[in-house]
Image (spheres, rainbow, N blue to C red):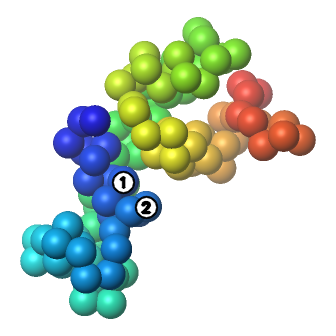
Amino acid sequence: MARNEELFVKLCLMHRVGSPETKELIEKGFLTSDHCLTQKGEEEVKKFVKAYKEPLYQAMKKYYSDNRTVMRKVGLENYVAFLFVMEELYNEGLLIKDEKGEYRLK
């Protein structure tokens, strides 16, 4: 997993109260002591999304029927991180979500 993806996952998905990783995120200024994202943490999340939005969109155009292929083509390993960026593309109106919650090109 790429460093920026690993940090994204830790910040948004997998930090646990009292864990060494969470303490490190707090010490580095990414999380507050009550486990909310700081401005630095929010900027890191935005940077991650920005880095993957366009590549994911382009990969969707080429491999739209296979999400795993799209993930691999852009270098993502964590499916939830992939879904997070896909949701951003959906919110921007570039994708639609079908009745099963799967993303498709508009």
Q: Decide: is 104 above or below 11.
A: above
- Residue reaching furthest to the bottom: 34
On screen, residue 78 above or below 69 = below
The secondary element bearing badge 2 is classed as: helix
Q: What residue lies at 73% left-to-right and 28% top-to-bottom?
A: 104
Quick one: SS at disc 1? helix
Residue 86 appearing in the image: yes
Q: Residue at x 28, y 67 (%)?
A: 41
- For label 2, the crowd category at 10 Å Cα-Cα, with few meaning under 14, some 14 to 19 and many 20 or more, is few
Which amino acid type is marked by label 2? Leu
Residue 42 left/right relative to 54: left
Expressed as whole percent of the image width and height from the top left, the position of residue 70 reads 52, 20
The residue wearing badge 2 is: 13
Q: How far apart are marks 2 and 1 (CA)?
A: 5 Å
> Which image quadrant for residue 40?
bottom left
Please, what is the three-letter code of the amino acid marked with disc 1? Answer: Val
Left or right of residue 49, residue 95 in this image = right
Front in this rendered view, residue 51 or 31: 31
Check whether the beta carbons of the residues at disc 2 and disc 1 lie within 8 A of each other. Answer: yes
Q: Where is residue 42 in the image (x, y as percent from the top left)?
A: 33, 66
